[in-house]
Image: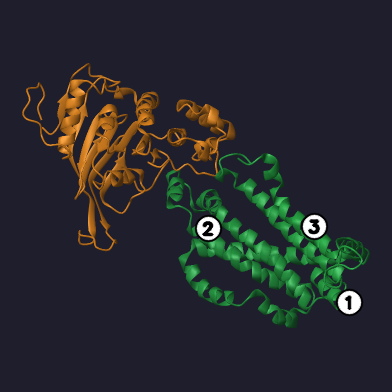
Chain colours: A orange, B green
Amino acid sequence: MSHLETTAGTAATADTSGTGNAAAITIRGLSKTFRDTRAGGTTGGEVRALDAVSLDIAAGAFVAIVGASGCGKTTLLRAIAGLETAHEGTVALDGEPVRAPGPDRGVVFQDHRLLPWLSVADNTALGLSALPAAERDERVRRALALVGLTDFAGAWPAQLSGGMAQRAAIARALAARPRALLLDEPLGALDAITRLRMQTELERIWRVEKITMVMVTHDVEEALLLGDTVVVMTPRPGRIKREHRIQLARPRDRESPVFQDLRRTLLVELELETPPPAVAGDYAI
Amino acid sequence: MKPPVIYGAAPFLVPAVLLAVWFLLTAGTKPAVNPLFLPPPATVLAGFGELWRDDLAGDFAASAITVLRGYICGVLVGLTTGAACGLSRLTERVLTPTLNTFRQVPGLAWLPLMILWFGAGTGGKTVLIGLAVFFPVFLNTLQGIRGVPAEYIEVGRVFGFGKLELLLRVVAPAALPGVFVGLRYGAGIAWAVLVVAEMLGARRGLGFLLMRSQELMHTHHLFALIFIIGGVGFSIDFGLRRLERHLLRWKRGFEG
């Protein structure tokens, strides 16, 4: 089997039975080729960003996609978001094909992309213009409370620190009540300490909101810390190398030997580390 | 470290020195400079009074109305054309070669033709000012829209914005800083073009008063008028800058 089953600790992945609002995502045979317009390209002018990628994401799951840059992980996420539509294969949300962006999918980009001319509260209300004012205000209030930015509702994005801006971006995506939240290296631009804090924060938000989360990252530890499933992708062409079901208890302890072993395994798969000599262990690759 | 008093007084330093030199050069019964070329400050001050009694307000109003009318016309046409070209490559391709050719003609070069077509009244000057204001507004609006980050457009798409909503809620505010550059630049040009146009052919207005004062050898009126023209230009820019600071207050992060 290509799945690595690790059952140290109590299996404590989210109970996905009560996730009425979460969406299941089905990806079948997704391929995407970019024309390389840069001069001196060694690829003959074409980059195979995604090559026949298929993936099932259960409703309410937290899926982390890891891979080096150029492995197509962001393209994959953008295809789910509906921002990338010229591709072969299909992306479906609860069986419904994705053709364009929609309110059922929230997106958090690596750069927070808060609109600088709107206050934090107005940014958070960006997807709520169809709602009556009272409900809109209530949604904004709750989303900002969830990410701990209540006191900054009236601030301009330029006044926020990197971590706060990214939390505001998460609040903005959540306020529209998506059934899946797509995170494109949401913590990539943050400093190490803020990053650790935000990882805990993301896990908490996922538990509270009970929606599907798909996070792209290049940080193996981050993927292991948060994902029910960690998908390893490799570049040229962008393919899924392996899917790991991670059944470590939450919150996960990054110092635990099992966590460290898993981390090692993933790094080997990403070809960032040479394989370790055969070690005795009760799990197998 | 600069003491705050000196820092606060700094903008008035150069005017104070100039004023002192002016007093020195024109003081006494035998001043260093012939009063015909440089009248003393008191005479210039009296000149304001003389001009006022000679219906300065009427000439000022004539100038103000003309410049305002021309400016508004130029801004409206510049904004719409700039937006049309910014949003559609085809429109840009249709219009810009022609507009770029016309742009090479200095604004005031149109004056004789305007006087021929519309007479020496305010009509021709309105068109002239409109023409001069049009180009900076058009170009900066076009650039402002082209400079809107694609990332912001994507945010709008993620939230399901339609074309109109994208335009009003993302493109327009993101392009506003660029647009304001054009508005401020255009305002400066409008005032300058007006005064020169009035000097070359008009029966009223500040530029007309300038020419008349020169012909009558009323040098102190010339000085008074130059102060007025400079003051008005300064106020226009100051007002627009305040408006810009308010509308673009998000750029600096802190409320202003």
Q: Which mark is residue A207?
A: none
The residue identified by callout 1 is: B216
Q: Which mark is residue B20?
A: 3
> Between disc 1 and disc 2, whose residue precedes?
2
Percent x, y of residue B168: 55, 51
Q: Residues within 10 Å of mark 1 (few under 14, many from 20)?
A: few
- Dot 3: what SS? helix
Can residue B92 be seen here? The reply is yes
- A6 horizontally vs A214: left or right: left
**Comparing labels 3 and 2, the label whose residue is closer to the camera:** 3
Q: Residue at x 69, y 62 (%)?
A: B72
On screen, residue A279 above or below B116: above
- Dot 2: what SS? helix
Quadrant in the picture for the N terminus of chain B: top right
Residue nearest the viewer, comparing B86 with A189: A189
> Between disc 1 and disc 3, whose residue precedes?
3
The residue identified by callout 2 is: B144
Q: Residues within 10 Å of mark 2 (few under 14, many from 20)?
A: many
Specify the quadrant of the image occupied by residue A4.
Answer: top left
Total label count?
A: 3
Q: Mark 1 and mark 3: span between their CA atoms?
A: 28 Å
Q: Residue at x 58, y 76 (%)?
A: B102
Quadrant in the picture for the C terminus of chain B: top right
Residue nearest the viewer, comparing A129 with A65: A65
Amino acid identity at mark 3: Ala
- B184 horizontally vs A114: left or right: right
* Dots 1 and 3 on the same chain: yes
> Between disc 3 and disc 2, whose residue precedes?
3
**Comparing labels 1 and 2, the label whose residue is closer to the camera:** 1
Amino acid identity at mark 1: Leu
Label 1: chain letter = B
